[in-house]
Image (spheres, rainbow, N blue to C red):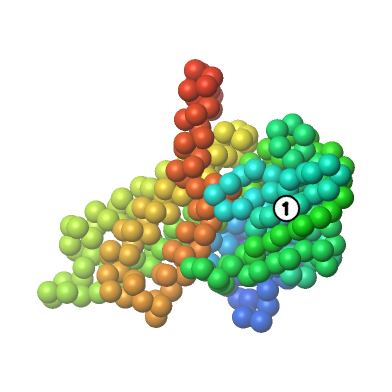
Amino acid sequence: MMDATERDLLQQTVRDAFVSADTTTSLDSVLVDLGWLEMLGTARRDAVDIVFRSLGAVNGTSSVLDDVVVSALGIEPRADLAVLLPSFATWHAPGTTDGTDVSAMGVATARVATAADLLIACGTGAELSAVTVPRSAVEQRVIEGVDPDGGFRVVRVDRAAIGSSLGRCEWDAAITWGRIAAAHQIEGACRSMLELARTHALERVQFGRVIAGFQAVRHRLAEALVAVEALDATLTAAMDEVGPLTAALAKATAGRTGQIVGAHAQQVLAGIGFTTDHPFHRFLKRSLVLEGLFGSADEIATEIGHQLLATRCVPTLIEL
């Protein structure tokens, strides 16, 4: 684990590199130059925290989520290996098996368009397997929707041979780290949305006063800040005790925070916040897409509720 000085230095380096990258340079290339895979291998917690928070803060598009999920599955990540993620609003293995064949449908980052291979987790319950198929065997379609710049694609594989067995723990770890990464990215986006609204409130004048002086505006900004800081605390706790439940709670909190901050920031920005002339819409749209990745806040909360009712036991998440 890095000490505070190393973390601050890395965070500033990553943020500066993202901001200074021109539009023709992909953030994947920037991260390769910064030694992303080495960071992920030696200091996963700090690497995921810093990189994904920074991606959210600059509304950047990258495929490094693939590396996070692949490494959590216990497989060596590489730049030409993409991974099939669960479809939006789900967190089950995207592949199904039928005898000796595998078919799959899910979501993938933009890496799938150029990667040599696609890694797919298949099966249900404890009977899971991993299969790697060449890109030529994959059907893919860019997801337009609210955030076409996000680079996500719908991917379908009709027939492939079953691969090596995959433990339930590895899949749970992949979902855990995927949720943590997405939650960090949403937090970065929320802080940027809040900063855009704060700046607007300090500059916009109505009735002879800057609107930051109006109590209603101050309340909205304050509630948004409280939500972001609560998410930060939840993520810190999840990183201290990394596990499926803490990651699920962090992802659910991130989803709720995105909704709260997005709504308050849009109200403070007023008319300009509803246009594409202001950058706010890009952060809001990206947070909406990320909210559905690995399950939305409502779906995760419902699943946790079912687990609590089934076990009749409230787990101790963190030793205080």
Camera-side residue of 158 and 186: 158
- Please tell me which residue is depicted at 28% across the width and 65% down the height of the picture: 268
Query: SS of the residue at dot 1?
Result: strand
The N terminus appears in which quarter of the rendering?
A: top right
Percent x, y of residue 273: 34, 71
Horizontal side of residue 136 vs 272, given as left or right: right
- Please tell me which residue is depicted at 57% across the width and 33% down the height of the picture: 245
Q: Is residue 79 visible?
A: no
On the image, which quarter does residue 96 sit in? Answer: top right
Camera-side residue of 148 and 45: 148
**What is the crowding at mark 1: few (fewer than 14 residues within 10 Å), some, or many (at least 20)?**
many
Percent x, y of residue 206: 17, 74
Residue hosting label 1: 104
Camera-side residue of 127 and 69: 127
- Please tell me which residue is depicted at 46% across the width and 49% down the height of the picture: 255
Residue 195 drawn above or below residue 181: below
Q: Residue furthest front?
A: 99
On the image, which quarter does residue 51 sit in? Answer: bottom right
